[in-house]
Image (tube, grey):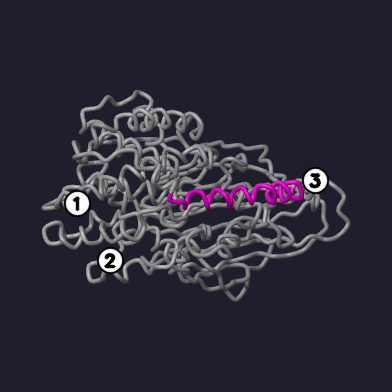
Amino acid sequence: MYRLKGIKLYFLSVLKLPLLVFKNYYLKSLFYNRKLVTYIPSRIFYTPSSFLCESLTTIKNDFYNINNTSTTSLWKISSKDKLKFSNLHSFLWLTKLDRKHSKIFIKDIISSWINNFSNYDPDTWKMEITGNRIIAWSSNSDIILQDSDKTYNKKLFSSLIKQSNFLIKNLSYVPYDSTKIICCTAIILSGIIFSENDLNYKIGIKELEKIIINYFDESGFPKSRNPEEVFICIKYLILIRECLKEAQKFVPNFLDEIILRIGNCYSFLSCSNKQFPLFNGATEINYKYYDIFLKNLKYKFNNKSYRIADLIKIKKKKLELFMDCGNPPTDNFARYYQAGCLAIELFSGKHKIISNSGYGKYLSSKFESLSRSTAAHSTLYMNDTSSCIFQKNNIVNEIYGNLLMEKLRVVNKSYTENKNSYLLSASHNGYEKKFGYAHTRSIKIMKREDKIFGTDELKKTKNYSNPVTFSVRFHIYPDNKIVKTKAGNSVLINLTNGEGWMLHCSTHNFEIEKNIFFGNKSKIINNESVSISSNSNEKKISVNWSIERIA
C-alpha cells in the first residue's frame, strides 16, 4: 500500500516541481524585491533589551567568532556547512561582541551584508534565518545605529522592512513548527520598533494565536513530540512577552497560558545534567544558562507528572529514566521524526549512561537519514529495518517535507507504582505487518537500590515462515568507557565521574560495536553501543536484561 502512496506522491511532486522553480525565479526578480519595500521609516521608536536576544544563543555552539575576519571573506562560508552558515547570517552573535569597541566594525558588517544580500537569496533568506536576523538587528540597534549617518540608517531601515514583509508574504508556506514561531516573533518585533508599522504587530499576534492552537497539544508540548522544539519555542514565546511588556503593549492571555503550559513541559524534560533527552529529532542542548535567564526574570515552572506527550519519565533521587511510548506524529508534524519507539535514555546525576544517537540534521543529509533509523536508538529492531518506513525520494521530500510512508501504533501502555518499584510497559505493531511480531518492552525500576530490570518481548501474531533476526541495542553515551566480561553476558560501564554500572543479560550474550553519535550540532562523535542479537522463529521471544550501579 505504501508503494502506491509513494508513486502517487512522486507524480504529484513532479507536477509541482516546475511551480517551485518558477516561484524561486520570481522571488529573485527585481520586480518582487522592489515590491517588498513598502516604505522607509524615519527612526526606531523602541529598542528591545539586548539581554533578551542573548537568551536565544548558547555560549559555545551558537557564537560565531568574527572579530578578526574581514568583511570581504566573511561571507565565504558555504551553505553546506549548515550550522555555521545559519549562525553567521542570523546575526544572533551580535550580543556576544564587545559593545564598547565593536560599533564601527559592526556597522561595516551590516553594510556589507546589505550590499551583498539585499535581494532574495534562497540560502541567506531562509525563513528561520531571516526571522532571527530581524530579531538580532532590532535587539542590537543601540550599537548598530550608534554614531551612524542618514544614508546608513535609510539602508538599514529599508532592509528591515523588506525582510519583515518577505516573512509576512511567505508565512503561510511555513509548516507549523518552531520556525513559524521565530517568524512571528520577528514580525511582531518589526511592528513595535517602528511606530508606522503597527499592522505588522497585529498580523504577528493574530498568526501567533493560530500557531499556538494548531501546533501544541493540551499539555503545551509541540505535536512533533520533539523535546528540542520545547526549548526553542519557550525561548521565543518568552522573548515576545518580555518585548511586549517593555514596549508597554498588551500581553494576550493566550500567550501567558501557552508559556505556563510549555514551561511545565520544559520542567518535565529537565535533567540533572542540564540537557534534554534525545527523542524525535532532538539534538543536544545545554539549558544551564537559560535557567539562569528564567530565574532572573522570575519565571518558575514545575511539573512532577510522570508522562507528557507519551514520553515517560521516572525520577528516583539521582536516577532519571525516559522512555518514548508515543505514536508517530501526523505528517504535518513529522518533519524530524525518528523511528525510536520504546527507546530509553538513562541518567545518573549529571551524567548520561544510555543515550539515543541524536538527530544529524546539521551534519549532512546522509547522517540525517541514518539517525532516523530504529538502529540509532536504544531499543529493539528487526531484520535491519526500522519500525516505521520513511519516504526516501529526494524530489518528494523537497515538495512535501520528510514523510512517513508506513507508521506504527503503540498499544497497551501501562504505568504502575508500588512500595518497592516503578513499573512501565508498552507495545507497538511496527514489525507486525512485515514480520508477524509485536514488540513489548517492560521496565521495572527498584526504589531502594539503583537497579533496573528490563524485558523485550517479541510475540508472534501472524504466520511468517522465515526466522527473524532481532537486536536489542543500548547506545552508550560518548566518553563513558565499557568492557565486556569474560562470560560475555555482562558489560561494565565506567562514567567520567568514576561511577560504575553493570549491564547484564540473563538470556543472551552481548556484543560491543563501534558507533556514531549525531547529537552534537557541530561535529560527529565516535561512541560505542552494546547489542544483543539473535534469530528465531518461536512464537514468543524474550530478552531479559538489567542495569545496576556497582560503584
Q: From the image, tell me which residue sits under label 1.
A: 151
Outermost residue, front direction?
31
For label 2, the crowd category at 10 Å Cα-Cα, with few meaning under 14, some 14 to 19 and many 20 or more, is: few
* Residue 121 on image: x %, y %: 44, 56
Does residue 403 appear left or right of residue 358 in this picture?
A: right
Callout 2: SS: loop
* Residue 3 on image: x %, y %: 78, 50
Q: Residue 323 — which label?
A: none
Does residue 384 appear left or right of residue 312 in this picture?
A: right
Callout 3: SS: loop
The quarter of the image holding the C terminus is bottom left
Which numbered disc, 1 or 3, marks the residue that appears first in the sequence? Answer: 3
Rendered view: 374 above or below 421: below
Q: From the image, tell me which residue sits under label 3.
A: 1
Q: State which region is magenta.
A: 6-30
Instruction: Please identify the dominant SS of the magenta region.
Output: helix
Nearer the viewer's eye, disc 1 or disc 2? Answer: 1
For label 1, the crowd category at 10 Å Cα-Cα, with few meaning under 14, some 14 to 19 and many 20 or more, is: few
Identify the amino acid type marked 1. Thr
Identify the amino acid type marked 2. Asn
Identify the amino acid type marked 3. Met
Residue drawn at the location 67% of the way across and 43% of the way down = 427
Residue 511 sits in which quadrant?
bottom right
For label 3, the crowd category at 10 Å Cα-Cα, with few meaning under 14, some 14 to 19 and many 20 or more, is: few
Does residue 522 appear left or right of residue 174 in this picture?
A: left
Q: From the image, tell me which residue sits under label 2.
A: 65
Asked whether 17 falls inside the magenta stretch, the response is yes
Nearer the viewer's eye, disc 2 or disc 3? Answer: 2
Which numbered disc, 1 or 2, marks the residue that appears first in the sequence? Answer: 2
Rendered view: 440 above or below 301: below
